[in-house]
Image (cartoon, rainbow, N blue to C red):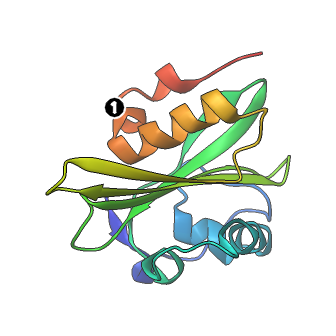
Amino acid sequence: MLKPIGIIAALLVAPGAFAADTTFSDLVKTPEGGKALAALISHQHLPNWIKTGGVESPAQTVTVKGNDYQVYAICKPHNCGNQQFAVLYSAKLKQMSGLYLQTNEKSHRETLQWLNVSDELSIDGKTILYAATTGSLSNHPTAFNYGE
């Protein structure tokens, strides 16, 4: 179920631990998650709703090269079809990557802005982030686990 960021309850888990039903707003309320997001979006030209809140759904866990990551997705309120943001976060590795996707309905084009996608995550990480923005990750959660 999608929830606006403004009405999310506080996390009741230990710092650095994220329950399966956590959301993007839960993540950025933690010191580690807030710091990681600030570093990820600094010096980027991104819309303000990413910082102030959007429509979100619970995180999903994926595995890439033996490491677990949480995938968080949010979209612009009242415009989810055209503006979306997703992050791939590992508390253990203290690593966050992201994707801002903007769709132009008139030209039928998507603009993808990749944020901090390391060489180690390049193909798999981008695939997961894109799948989070399109709904494929939600529809096929086990299809996006990449082992060793």
Residue 124 lies in what quarter of the image? top right
Quarter of the image with the N terminus in it: bottom left
Q: Quadrant of residue 82?
A: bottom left
Q: Residue furthest left?
A: 106
The x and y percentages for residue 92 are 85, 47
**12 on left or right of 105:** right
Closer to the camera in the image, 113 or 131: 113
Kindly identify which residue carries mark 1: 139
27 or 46, nearer to the observer: 46
Residue 4 is situated, as x and y percent measured from the top left of the image, at 36, 74
Kindly identify the residue that appears in the image at 18 percent across and 53 percent down: 107
| Furthest residue in direction right, as rendered | 93
**Residue 50 location (% of width, % of height):** 49, 74
Q: Quick one: SS at disc 1?
A: helix
Instruction: Determine whether 77 is above or below 117 in the image.
Output: below
Q: In the image, is 79 to the left or to the right of 143? A: left
- Apparent side of residue 64 relative to residue 77 in the rendered image (left or right): right
> Residue at image x 54%, y 80%?
51
The percent position of residue 103, horizontal first and vertical second, equals: 29, 55
The residue at 39%/59% (across/down) is 84
Q: Which amino acid, by three-letter code, is at mark 1? A: Asn
Residue at x-position 71% and y-position 17%:
147
Q: How many marks?
A: 1
Q: Quadrant of the C terminus?
A: top right
Q: Is residue 38 above or below residue 102?
A: below
